[in-house]
Amino acid sequence: MTTTLRADAARNRDRVLATARALVAEGDLSLQLNDIARRAGVGVGTVYRHFPTRRALLEALAADAFATLLDQAQAASREDDPWAGLQRLLRSILLGQLTEPTLAEVLSTSPDEDATAPTTTRRAELAALAATVLERAVRAGQLRPGLTLDDLQHLVCGTAFAARIADAPDDRVELYLAVLLAGVRAPDQGSPPPA
């Protein structure tokens, strides 16, 4: 009997996540838990049992994209060429935000807003990896002096926003990324290699 209840709970959780993903795919990031319960065909209490807040649901939706981003950040930190590592990191963060709007929202908010410990852990791991990549580029003289990790985060978020509002976002991403990379590269490094 307990196994059946757990299986039902897992199915309900999956149904809630699938419904929320469909809403996000339609461009609705409001994630109104009562509306999701109705659309998923489950009770409101069921939704709140799995996701006590909108933020908890948002983080669950972003979890896979966050894990993928961490894999890319780890790979960036192991690049032999510090500039290639920075390019890879910035590209991964930008594309992650563009392909998964829930990740963009999680990354653009303060750790104080995290609803779950795994998100806080992922955020700290990403910050540590990004700091490593940034420090390597600074030591190699490849990064514009004075730029901080916060600066890069804001620049990537701004670039993601610009790409989202462009008439043909898919056509603009590479151009915007190239402009971002050219802007953060140290002035004496010449023209940056293509992004």
Image: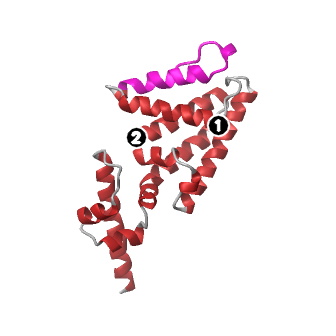
Residue lying at 46% horizontally and 46% vertically, measured from the top left: 105
Q: Is residue 11 visible?
A: no
Indicate which disc, 1 or 2, sits on the residue closer to the N terminus: 2
Per the image, the residue denoted by label 2 is 99
Q: Secondary structure at mark 1?
A: helix
Is residue 132 shown in magenta?
Answer: no
State the extent of the magenta-drawn residues as a range. Answer: 171-194
Number of numbered markers: 2
Q: Tell whether 141 sits left or right of 72.
A: right
Examine the rendered structure and indicate whether residue 5 appears above or below residue 67: below
Residue at point 64% right, 12% down? Answer: 190
Q: Position of residue 47 (x, y in %)?
A: 35, 68
Please say whether residue 192 is one of the residues in the magenta stretch.
yes
In which quadrant of the rendered view does residue 2 lie? bottom left
Q: Residues within 10 Å of mark 2 (few under 14, many from 20)?
A: few
Residue for badge 1: 149
Q: Residue at x 70, y 27 (%)?
A: 146
- The disc label shown at residue 167, or none: none
Q: Are marks 1 and 2 in contact (CB under 8 Å)?
A: no
Disc 1 marks which amino acid? Answer: Leu
Image quarter for residue 175?
Answer: top left
Figure quadrant of residue 8? bottom left
Percent x, y of residue 19: 29, 58
Residue 85, image x and y in percent? 62, 32
Q: Quadrant of the N terminus?
A: bottom left
Nearer to us: label 1 or label 2: 1
CA neighbours of label 1 inside 10 A, class few (<14), some (14 to 19), many (20+):
some
* Main SS class of the magenta portion in the image: helix
Residue extending farthest bottom: 1
Given the image, on which type of amino acid does mark 2 rest?
Thr
Element under label 2? Answer: helix
Q: CA distance from mark 1 to mark 2?
A: 22 Å
